[in-house]
Image: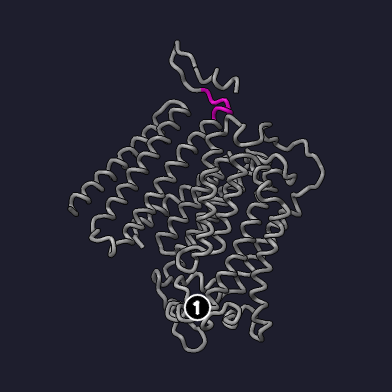
């Protein structure tokens, strides 16, 4: 039981770190501002979720009875609250940065022969 | 020649001298280090005195809160006064009444969060986040006896929640909730609460900020709980002042003192 | 206190400080100063001074960055230094 829980938490944390690596590589390698923000925003949010969920699962590894181990449950609740707030605020921050870039006339890189649909969306707004 | 070169040489020499000074430091977390020794009454070290005695004398588990709000009450009071004075200084320099400044950055014409298409995501998230931030700030203020936190941290978080409203919408949205009249009143009220907790023991014939005699006011059994409750009152005063001054500084800085438009 | 953790944070602190001093764009400098404040908060929390770390997280990394940006947007954005 204990070993299973620790293995699950380690798998979650390692997956999170892998997505962090992906976000960092994307931030460095992608060509324009919007693609970079895409990598940073999505990778960051998902990997934070996975790492903190891993911590929350790890807290369960010596959980025996509810009456005795309720402080552990409290720690898990706090970690889940952190997850919730990262999920609320991190995509919003990405969206606000994208908006600021668009208002600052940062042009996205678009392949030849394709049209930029964002342009006609934003003109009438 | 290059002035940065001379500056770097001076910085490197100072850094080397400081690094040399580190070699005489006591070990990390040593309660008997020289800086803590030499308290009167024969106690071997100030830190040990606080660690051993402060819970019995104040019934506050968090050492930092009891030291800040009771043992070093004067210090914290004048820190609050310094924050208040900083806010007043910025108010005196920046605030301009009745003059329409041309260079003010104007906010978008659709002033409300809901009406502005571009800000609907940010506005909604901030609307969800602000109550939670404020409740957590109140928890930090009220629970400073048992966990990290206290008046300064909670006050800054409360002020930051109003700054968040101002950043997500515009300054008018925040000023509608927390007007200039109310933040000036609350900033002064915080100082008055702190000083009042100091004067109250004087009325009862003890020293300034000697909370122990307030047990009759709080109907507690013994001076220890009176100290604990007085610390809570003092923290609330600090939180009120810090919250109001943080928001006042932001409102004046972001709108060049006109309180119109904002960022 | 974990020495390796300390050293990592201190190295990042020095890097953040040098970048914040050298950047010409004051807006970037203010953001990097926020990173500096957050790293110092981490260092203090790791050394056990949780109250100080909490104050630094709220004041240094939170509100003071906002105040810097509010000031920069109302003055000049480029540093002449």
Taking the image as shown, residue B218 lies to the left or right of residue B53, namely right
Residue B6 visible in rendering = no
Quarter of the picture holding the N terminus of chain B: top right
Query: Which secondary structure lies at badge 1?
Result: helix
- The residue at 40%/39% (across/down) is A45
- The residue at 36%/63% (across/down) is C1
The front one of B10 and B57 is B57
Residue A54 visible in rendering = yes
Relative to B53, does residue A54 appear above or below in the rendering?
A: above
Relative to A55, does residue C78 appear above or below in the rendering?
A: above
The front one of B102 and B46 is B102
Relative to B67, does residue A41 appear above or below in the rendering?
A: above
The question of residue B243 being in magenta is answered with no
Give, as a single range, the part of the protein colored magenta. A101-107
Labels in figure, total: 1
- The residue at 47%/21% (across/down) is A109
**Residue B51 pos. (x, y %):** 43, 77
Residue reaching furthest right?
B98
Residue B196, picture quadrant: bottom right
The front one of B75 and A95 is A95
Residue reaching furthest top?
A113
Taking the image as shown, residue B179 lies to the left or right of residue C49, namely right
**Residue B210 pos. (x, y %):** 60, 80
**Residue B255 pos. (x, y %):** 70, 43
Crowd band around label 1 with a 10 angstrom C-alpha radius: few (<14), some (14–19), many (20+) = many
Quarter of the picture holding the C terminus of chain B: top right
Circle 1 chain: B
Residue labelled with disc 1: B58
**Residue A101 pos. (x, y %):** 54, 30
Q: How is the image coloured?
A: one colour
């Amino acid at each position: 039981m204990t070993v299973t829980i620790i293995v699950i938490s380690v798998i979650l944390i390692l997956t999170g770190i892998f997505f962090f690596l992906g976000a960092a590589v994307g931030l460095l390698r992608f060509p324009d501002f919007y693609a970079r923000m895409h990598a940073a925003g999505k990778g960051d949010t998902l990997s934070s979720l996975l790492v903190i969920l891993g911590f929350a699962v790890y807290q369960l590894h010596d959980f025996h009875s509810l009456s005795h181990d309720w402080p552990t449950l409290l720690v898990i609740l706090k970690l889940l609250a952190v997850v919730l707030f990262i999920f609320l605020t991190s995509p919003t921050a990405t969206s606000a940065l994208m908006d600021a870039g668009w208002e600052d006339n940062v042009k996205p890189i678009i392949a030849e022969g394709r049209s930029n649909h964002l342009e006609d969306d934003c003109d009438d707004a | 020649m290059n002035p940065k070169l001379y500056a770097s040489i001076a910085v490197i020499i100072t850094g080397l001298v400081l690094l040399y000074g580190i070699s005489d430091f006591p070990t990390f977390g040593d309660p008997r280090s020289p800086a803590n020794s030499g308290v009167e009454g024969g106690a071997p070290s100030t830190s040990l005195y606080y660690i051993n005695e402060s819970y019995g004398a104040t019934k506050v588990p968090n050492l930092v809160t009891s030291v800040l709000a009771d043992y070093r009450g004067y210090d914290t009071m004048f820190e609050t006064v310094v924050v208040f004075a900083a806010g007043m200084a910025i108010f005196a320099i920046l605030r301009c009444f009745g003059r329409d400044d041309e260079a003010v950055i104007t906010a978008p014409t659709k002033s409300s969060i809901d009406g502005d298409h571009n800000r609907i995501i940010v506005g909604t998230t901030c609307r969800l986040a602000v109550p939670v931030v404020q409740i957590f700030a109140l928890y930090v203020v009220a629970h400073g006896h048992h966990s990290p936190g206290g008046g300064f941290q909670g006050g800054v978080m409360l002020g930051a929640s109003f700054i968040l409203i101002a950043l997500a919408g515009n300054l008018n949205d925040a000023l509608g909730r927390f007007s200039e009249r109310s933040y000036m009143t609350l900033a002064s009220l915080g100082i008055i609460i702190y000083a009042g907790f100091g004067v109250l023991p004087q009325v009862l014939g003890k020293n300034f900020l000697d909370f122990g005699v307030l047990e009759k006011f709080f109907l507690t059994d013994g001076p220890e709980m009176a100290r604990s409750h007085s610390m809570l009152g003092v923290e609330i005063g600090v939180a009120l002042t810090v919250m109001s001054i943080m928001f006042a500084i932001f409102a004046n800085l972001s709108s060049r003192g006109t309180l119109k438009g904002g960022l | 206190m974990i020495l390796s953790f300390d050293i990592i944070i201190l190295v990042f602190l020095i890097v953040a400080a040098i970048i914040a001093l050298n950047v010409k764009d004051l807006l970037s400098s203010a953001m990097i100063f926020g990173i500096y404040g957050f790293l110092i908060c981490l260092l203090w929390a790791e050394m056990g001074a949780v109250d100080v770390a909490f104050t630094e997280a709220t004041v240094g990394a939170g509100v003071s960055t906002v105040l810097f940006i509010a000031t920069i947007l109302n003055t000049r954005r480029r540093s002449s230094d």
